Image (tube, rainbow, N blue to C red):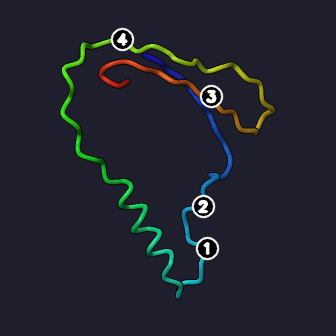
């Protein structure tokens, strides 16, 4: 179990609105493709694998960044069922 409080401020970094002229249809194709990626694949039948507790394969490292800059924390965890 983990808990965190993260406070952020500022504008979002992702632009969701199209920057293409309205008459261009390529954005429609992009949206169709993205929508197909968001469909959850059918769940595979759960193997009869024994349960195992989550284990950090690589742990997040502490980092110092100036205020207003990005910080990135990466880790890998294994276990069954998948954490």
x, y (%) of residue 45?
Answer: 18, 33
Residue nearest the observer in this picture, 70 or 74: 74
Residue occupied by mark 1: 19
3 or 1: tag closer to the N-terminus: 1
Where in the figure is residue 78, as x and y percent of width and height?
A: 42, 20
Side of 83 relative to 66 (left or right): left
Q: Residues within 10 Å of mark 1 (few under 14, many from 20)?
A: few
**What separation in Å lies between label 2 and label 4 (alpha carbons)?**
39 Å
> Residue 15: which disc?
2
Which marked residue is nearer to the observer: mark 4 or mark 3? 4
Decide: marks 1, 2 in contact (CB < 8 A)? yes
Counting residues from the start of the chain, the first of labels 4 and 3 encountered is 4
Q: Position of residue 11 (x, y in %)?
A: 66, 52
Q: Earlier in the sequence, mark 2 or mark 4?
A: 2
Q: Of callouts 2 and 3, which one flags the residue occurring earlier in the amino acid sequence?
A: 2
User: Which disc is residue 53 wearing?
Assistant: 4
Residue annotated with mark 3: 73
> Dividing the picture into quarters, in which one does residue 33 lie?
bottom left
């Amino acid at each position: 179990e983990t808990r965190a409080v993260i406070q952020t401020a500022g504008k979002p970094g992702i632009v969701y609105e199209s920057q293409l002229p309205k008459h261009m249809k390529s954005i429609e194709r992009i949206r169709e493709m993205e929508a197909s990626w968001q469909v959850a694949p059918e769940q595979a039948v759960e193997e009869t694998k024994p349960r195992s507790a989550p284990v950090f394969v690589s742990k997040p490292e502490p980092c110092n960044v100036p205020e207003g800059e990005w910080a990135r924390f990466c880790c890998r965890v294994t276990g069954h069922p998948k954490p």
